[in-house]
Image (tube, grey):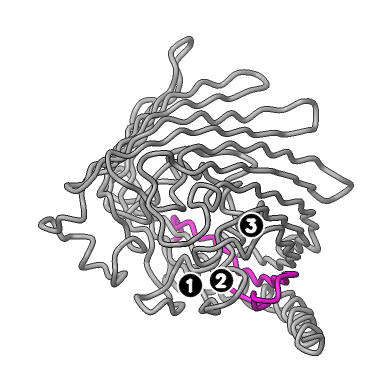
Amino acid sequence: MRRNNILRSVLLGSFGLLIGYSHLVADELGREAYRSGLLPKSMDVNGSVNVTSQFSNQKNLQNEVLSSFNLLASMPMVGGKLNFFIEGNTSPSENGVAQTLQGSNADAGTAVNSKGQGRIQLSEFNYARSLKNSQLAIGLINPASFLDVSDIANDENIQFLSKQLINNASIALPDYTLAFALHHEPEKVLPGYTLFISSSHGLADTEDGSYVSLFEVTNKNKGVFSAVEFYQSYQVMRPRIGVWLKNVEQYRKYGSYITVDGRINKLLWNTRFGIATSSASVLASEVGRAASLVVEYPVLNSQAGAGVAYLKASDKNVVSNVASSAENNANSLQSEVYVRMRLNKRLHMTPSLQYFNNSVVNGNTSGENALVANLRFGYEV
């Protein structure tokens, strides 16, 4: 085991050296593409590559190294913009930390096929247009880009790895899905708002993870997800409050949430609280209450962050196939601390430490009191 850890460290060090050189090549290739006309000069392209090592103190969890890349591009089209988002993942190990310890790595498994194997996929493809004080988008969209957003707790590539600290776990957000979104900016005393309507299931929510399944309209397991969110910006605070509904033929889920970003001098903070309920019986791991608090503070040329999240099981006709208490299985306390260090203009390194208390692992509590040490290298294109 120790030998494997050393090999991983060597690989990560080599990756850092390689990527530091490759950005010079990428810059030159990009400039040449614009000069030759292969890319339109008005096209905006950016992205990142991430390599994350995860090590747990739990013997039943396999330590692993996972990598991913993200590429976002937009280009002018008919008074608006056409947006593309392409991403790829390596395959998470079946007994690895990311796969079995829920929420430990929000960047893992975001692009996988029906067999759970990593792939390259077109995750977003939508048309967006700005109107007076408003923006609308239609197409294949990530709901988390419009709802429950935060400046310091919304990006697993540069902020927290823990999924529960970058989104409210009580909201039944679909994965990348066909949707319509309308966002309106605040006007004087009137709050801004976001209206979001989409399919109840996205790419990762279907059995086969195929694009064809996104267009199925006769599937009884699918329905509509809708949400309305209001927000207002103040000098030191930005509160958001929203309600959502997931309406499928067999059941109905709904809930409400609050998200607040704020700052105290250089200290940035975010807090979230959400309540959800269902019209039908739910699994033992279904979240009925969620609360979190995170902070971020600059330290020299780095950013330090800390956060904690508490998840409580739904009390609506809980169904469980495990022998132990179903409600206790889904109740968990999760926390993370990290330091993001900028190595150069494009490369950053983020060591972090996570603690999970009574987190569900494959339907049991073997993840109780689990510690996970992480090391993430990120390269921004």
Marks 1 and 2, Cα distance to the nearest angstrom?
5 Å
Identity of the residue furthest to the left in this view:
218
Q: Which structural element holds mark 2?
A: strand
The part of the chain drawn in magenta is: 41-68
Residue at 73% x, 72% y is 55
Mark 2 or mark 3: name the one nearer the start of the chain.
2
- Check disc 1: other Cα within 10 Å, few if <14, some if 14-19, many if 20+: many
Residue at 31% x, 46% y is 281
Is 87 displayed left or right of 355 in the figure?
A: left
Q: Which structural element holds mark 1?
A: strand
In this rendering, the answer to whether 287 lies above or below 237 is below
Can you tell which quarter of the image residue 215 is in? bottom left
Q: Which residue is denoted by mark 2 in the rendering?
A: 68
- Residue 221: x and y, percent? 20, 56
Front residue of 320 and 268? 320
Q: Which structural element holds mark 3?
A: loop
Q: Which numbered mark, 3 or 1, is in the foreground of this view?
A: 3
Residue at 50% x, 27% y is 240
Front residue of 289 and 202? 289
- Residue 4: x and y, percent? 75, 87
In this rendering, the answer to whether 224 lies above or below 10 is above
Can you tell which quarter of the image residue 49 is in? bottom right
Q: Main secondary structure of the magenta part?
A: strand
